[in-house]
């Protein structure tokens, strides 16, 4: 059940995983889990996808739900 409007929907999907390696960037948002790092950009894919979902959801003229 998608609420009062059961019309068409758009689903968005992105990948997010980690690599078995230590992150030694020293950045404040670096991994704090030993030997696990997001070093391939997939965390950026997820951030971009969330931004796209927010932008689409706030567009009143979009013909489908997000």
Image (spheres, rainbow, N blue to C red):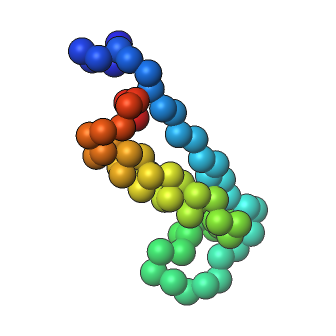
User: Up-down: is 30 above or below 43?
Assistant: below
Using the rendered image of the protein, determine whether residue 35 is visible from the camera's viewpoint: no
From this view, report whether residue 59 is shown above or below residue 33: above
- In which quadrant is the N terminus drawn? top left
Horizontal placement of 51 versus 35: left or right?
A: left
Please identify the quarter of the rendering in which residue 24 is found.
bottom right
Q: Nearer the viewer, residue 14 or 25?
A: 14
Name the image quarter holding the C terminus.
Answer: top left
Residue at (68% x, 69% y) in the render: 39
Q: Position of residue 54 (x, y in %)?
A: 35, 49
Coordinates of residue 19 in the picture (x, y in percent): 73, 61
Relative placement, left or right, of 58 versus 7 is left
Residue at screen point 54% across, 75% down? 30
Q: Nearer the viewer, residue 49 or 15?
A: 49
What's the residue at 53%, 39% (across, down)? 12
Left or right of 15 in this view: 61: left
35 shown above or below 49: below
């Amino acid at each position: 059940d998608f609420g009062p409007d059961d019309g068409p929907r758009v689903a968005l999907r992105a990948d997010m995983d980690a690599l078995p390696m230590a992150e030694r960037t020293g950045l404040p948002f670096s991994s704090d889990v030993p030997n696990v790092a997001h070093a391939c950009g997939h965390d950026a894919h997820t951030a971009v996808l969330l931004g796209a979902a927010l932008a689409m959801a706030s567009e009143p003229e979009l013909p489908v739900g997000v």
